[in-house]
Image (cartoon, rainbow, N blue to C red):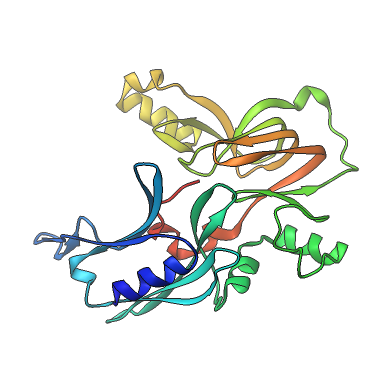
Amino acid sequence: MNAKHIESRFAEIGAHLKVRQIPSRWHRGVRQWIDPQDYALDIRRDGHNEFFELRVPTHLSDSLEVNVAQSEPKERHLLLFVRKTGDTPQLDRFLCGHDEREWFVAAVPGGASSVRQAMDALQPANVREALARIRVSARKRYERKNRAFRRQGEWFFVPEPSLVVDDKFVLRNEPLRRGAGKPHIVQEILRTGGEIVHVCSRHPNGLTSDEYKNLLKRTPGASRWGWRVMSRNPGVYARGAVSHADHATITLPCWHRVVMNTETQSRTMVNVAFLD
C-alpha cells in the first residue's frame, strides 16, 4: 500500500488522511490474530481539524491493497477501495467526503465503481422510487433537497402529504439515531409497528424484553442505567424541525416517511468506526 499516494488523493478533495499501523497480537488458544483482527476507517479530530484515519493491524499490512477508484474534487467526494488478498480475498468500498459541515465515511453496498454509483447505492428503495415517480433530474437527484426527498446526514425524508395522523400517537422532540451516533432530534414523530426494545447509553441498539429481564437478573444495578422504551425498525414518519449538531436544521411542513441510507446493508459496515 502506497500511503503517500493515497494521502495525496485525499488531499485532492481537501481532506487529510493518516495511515496508522496497530500492533497485532497472536492468541495461542484460538490460534488467530486479535486486538485488532481487522482494519478500521474512522474520522478523528486533531485540535480543531478533522482527518480520516485508516488503522491497519500489522498482520494485514502486506495483504491490504488500498486505492482511490474515483474522485470528484468539486463535490469533495471520493470512492475508496480496500482489497484484502490471501486465502479469502474481498473488496470493500467506502464513500468518503464532505457533507454540509463535516467529513464523513460510509460503507457502500453492491459493486459501485464511481462516486455517483456509490451515491446511488446508498439511496434506499423508497427514495429511488420517489425519484423515478417524480422524475427528478440527474443533476438534482444527489442534492440534500429536491422534490422527492429532504436529507439530513444518513436519513432521508420522503413526503407523505396525504397521511392522516391521530395526534395522541405523536411523540415530540424525539431522537432519531443509528447505533451510538449523535441523535437527530425530530419535533414531531410517529412510529408504527416495529419491535419494542429497551434502550440506554450502554445498549444504544436496544434489548428485547427477554434480554432486558435477563440483564436485570444478572445485574440488578442495571435498572438505574437510564432506560427508555422505544421501537426498533418501525415505520417512522416525521414533521416539523429536524436538528443535529453537525447539520443545518431542516423543516418538514407535512408528514414525511423516514428511511435510512443503505449503509447497514454492506458487510463492510463493521470496518467503519465513524458514526454520525
- Along the line of sight, the residue nearer the viewer: 144 or 266: 144
Which residue: 55% across, 36% down? 245
Say which quarter of the image contains residue 161: top right
- Residue 265 relative to residue 59: left or right: right
Query: Which residue is located at x 86 percent, y 64 percent?
Result: 133
With 259 as the anchor, is 1 left or right in this view?
left
For residue 25, what is the image quadrant? bottom left
Image spot of residue 128 (x, y percent): 74, 64
Q: Nearer the viewer, residue 107 or 201?
A: 107
Q: Quadrant of residue 189?
A: top right
Against 268, is 161 above or below? above
Residue 170's place in the image compared with 162, above or below, is: above
> Given the current orientation, which residue lies at the most extreme right position?
162
Q: Relative to 267, is 160 above or below?
A: above
- Seen at 55% across and 41% down, the residue is 246
Residue 153 in the image, given as x and y percentages of width and height: 60, 49
Task: Estimate the x, y position of residue 102 in percent, counting from the top left.
Answer: 51, 49
As drawn, the residue found furthest toward the left would be 28
Query: Dividing the image into 4 quarters, which one contains the N terminus?
Result: bottom left
The residue sitting at 52% across, 60% down in the picture is 97
**Residue 115 left/right relative to 83:** right
